[in-house]
Structures are given as C-alpha cells and as structure tokens.
Amino acid sequence: MEHSSDSPTTLNIASYSDDWRSRLLSTFAHTPFTVSCGAININCASVEGFWQGLKWPEGSADRERIFGLSALEAKLAGQGAPATTHVRLCGRDVRIGSAEHHDLARLAMRAKLEQNASVQRALEATDDLVFTHVLVDETGRPYPDSLTLPAAVFCAIWTELRVEWRLHQSQR
C-alpha cells in the first residue's frame, strides 16, 4: 500500500512499499552490516535491529540478539527494553532523541549503504527524488511520527548520504 505522499518527485521510504528502492532504504530491510566499536565489531541484520538493540544494556544477550533481527520482529523486540533516557554504545552514554542519538542512526545507515551493493543501487536509482517517510496503518491512517528518529531527520540522513555517495563515486 502506497501513501499519497508518493508522487513523481518524492519517494516515501517504507518497508511495505511497492517500490524496491523504498523497501531497501527502509530501516526494516534485511541489509546486514557491521559497525565497529573500537576493537569490537557489532553485526546487525538491519538498521531497525541496530536501533532497537541500542535500547538494551551494552553487552547484554538481548542486545546482541536484537542486533541480528530485521523487519517487524526487530521493532517489536525493542518494546520490552528497560525504560531509560540514554543508550550506551562503545562505553558512551547518548541521550535518546539527541543529535548524538541521530548520529548513531547515521552511522548505521552509512554502514548499511557502504556494505550492501543492493542498497547502493537503490540509493543511486533515487535520482533527485525528495525522500518522505509517512507510515500508514492498514486503513491508510498515518502513524504518529517517531520521537526518537523523526521522519525529517531520517530523510535528511538519506539525502546527506546520497550526496556523499555521489561525491565518493565521482572521485573513483
């Protein structure tokens, strides 16, 4: 199901989209990547798995398990996390919803892009489309925007990464 925010000039990034580019750029996509944390490599199945896994204590079995999930399974796995105002990564506390927290999303999204040829092709194929991220339920009603990674931030990250990727490709 597509949302009306899709037009010839926009691409609504959503896991349920009919558009292959949209599905691959979504946080739910199974697009494995590794993020380095000093000498430790964190293996993730999806950006959603990374994002939800961060909610769990550093070094916990729950965190490691959730990092390996994707799609709705990853989203739901974050629901039982202990209530907190910060996440901890690489021994550093980061306030949830802060610019530094958004930088963690950027880190994961960049790793996903750099380590997955299919994601590279999807991003390249977006041309100059404006990214949107309007998620709707089965009745077509929009879900509320995320408080931790608002749609505007998520779309801005993909836009920045597209500019960086093109620059990188042109210098090769």
Image (cartoon, rainbow, N blue to C red):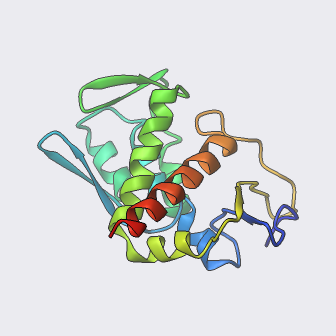
Residue 114: x and y in percent read 36, 63
What is the quadrant of the N terminus in the image?
bottom right
> Which residue lies at the image location 73% right of the left edge and 41% below the top edge?
145
Residue 143: x and y in percent read 77, 48
- Relative to 41, is 22 above or below? below
Residue 50: x and y in percent read 40, 49
Say whether residue 100 is visible: yes
- Relative to 132, is 106 above or below? above
* Front one among 44 and 105: 105
> Which residue lies at the image location 28% right of the left edge and 48% below the top edge?
64
Residue 167: x and y in percent read 44, 60
Q: Is residue 148 left or right of residue 46?
A: right
What is the quadrant of the C terminus in the image?
bottom left
Total numbered labels placed on residues in the image: 0
Say whether residue 69 is visible: no
> Which residue lies at the image location 55% right of the left edge and 48% below the top edge?
157
- Relative to 144, is 139 above or below? below
Q: Quadrant of residue 44?
A: bottom left
> Which residue lies at the image location 80% right of the left edge and 70% below the top edge?
2
Please, which residue is most extreme toward the left here? 39
